[in-house]
Image: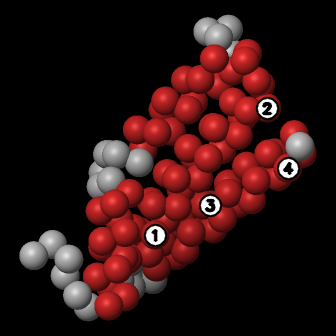
């Protein structure tokens, strides 16, 4: 099962990287990128939490002790879902772009 946890970390990392590169490409081509940036931010921050949680699972109880940085990674990853637009706000922005309906009011 360790291999499954590690493979999920690898897949999430690759997908987050590709979404981020997509945004960079749009910026380089001077094309609109706001929705894609929201998608990249949402996916990457949630993937970071999943990855840190999976890493903690790999380490077991040792993941919680101060001698390993895994617990800190989880705390650090979790905060990325909150600043610069929470995951919920990113969902609303993406949904508005897809539907044209403004859920903000």
Q: Is residue 63 left or right of residue 6?
A: left
- Please, is residue 7 above or below residue 105 in the view? above
Q: CA distance from mark 2 to mark 3?
A: 23 Å
Residue marked by disc 3: 17
Q: Earlier in the sequence, mark 3 or mark 1?
A: 3
Q: Earlier in the sequence, mark 4 or mark 1?
A: 4
Q: CA distance from mark 3 to mark 1?
A: 12 Å
* Residue at 36% in and 76% down: 94
Looking at the rendered image, the disc whose residue lies closer to the viewer, 4 or 3, is 4
Q: Which mark is residue 4?
A: 4
Q: Earlier in the sequence, mark 2 or mark 3?
A: 3
Residue marked by disc 2: 58
Q: CA distance from mark 4 to mark 1?
A: 25 Å
| Residue closer to the observer: 2 or 42 | 2
Q: Earlier in the sequence, mark 1 or mark 2?
A: 1
Q: Residues within 10 Å of mark 4 (few under 14, many from 20)?
A: few
Identify the secondary structure beneath mark 1. Answer: helix
């Amino acid at each position: 099962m360790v291999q499954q946890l590690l493979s999920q970390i690898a897949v999430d990392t690759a997908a987050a990287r590709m979404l981020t590169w997509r945004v960079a490409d749009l910026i380089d081509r001077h094309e609109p990128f706001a929705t894609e940036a929201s998608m990249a931010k949402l996916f990457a921050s949630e993937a970071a939490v999943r990855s840190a949680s999976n890493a903690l699972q790999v380490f077991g109880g040792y993941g919680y002790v101060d001698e390993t940085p895994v617990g800190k990674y989880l705390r650090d990853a979790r905060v990325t879902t909150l600043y610069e637009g929470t995951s919920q706000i990113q969902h609303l922005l993406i949904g508005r772009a897809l539907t044209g309906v403004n859920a903000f009011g």
